[in-house]
Amino acid sequence: MSPYGEIADHMRRVMPKNTIFVRDITLPAYQWGHRLIPIYEPRTSIHATGGGIGQSLPTAIGAQIGQPDQRCLVFAGDGGFMVNLGEMATAVEEKLPLVVVLFDDHGYGVLRNIQDATYGRRVAVDLHTPDFVQLAQSIGFHATRVKTTDDFGEVLENAIQKPVLQWLS
């Protein structure tokens, strides 16, 4: 599960025990998010059990508004997050202290793996994605691109110290 195990360890070490973890329907969230991040308090683990991709940010906005004294950490993949431009603007307008961890593999990772295993080829699963850091900054997020798991812990610690939106890509 490495490097995801290291990322999960950093999340749990840095984030408060009552952090609300909101996971999208994405490979990292389902592959290891359900398995490797201990949850210590009720109602602090939110994930979709049906529907489509892209639900994590709007869900986290609602959770953050409903629990203003807790931190929400969103983790999503780039494919699902592409549908959240309007929600990004809402989060900025509301000055919500969200932390977004975005896994950018330039595609629909779950579908890519299914197609590779089942058909030996890929169709319509590789995406042209924006520079998410520039996109996030242009709309008002504080944004950082993390290149290694060693850097992730420090960047996450800095992110939770800020009172408003963060974005780790």
Image (cartoon, grey):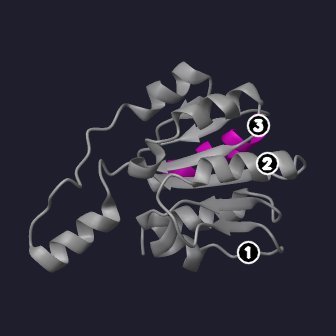
**Among numbered discs 3 and 2, the one appearing first in the sequence:** 2
What residue span does the magenta drawing correspond to? 150-162
Distance (Cα) linking label 3 and label 2: 7 Å
- Tags 3 and 1 touching, CB below 8 Å: no
Q: Residue at label 1?
A: 39
Vertical relation: 28 (above or below) 136: below
Tag 3's secondary structure? loop
Distance (Cα) linking label 1 and label 2: 17 Å
The number of numbered badges drawn on the structure is 3
Residue 80 badge: none
Q: Residue at x 76, y 49 (%)?
A: 62
Vertical relation: 150 (above or below) 27: above
Q: Residue at x 51, y 64 (%)?
A: 51
Tag 1's secondary structure? loop
Quarter of image, res 46: bottom right
Distance (Cα) linking label 3 and label 1: 22 Å
Residue furthest top in the image: 138
Vertical relation: 57 (above or below) 112: above
The kind of residue on which mark 3 rests is: Leu
Q: Is residue 156 magenta?
A: yes
Vertical relation: 19 (above or below) 38: above
- Tags 3 and 2 touching, CB below 8 Å: yes
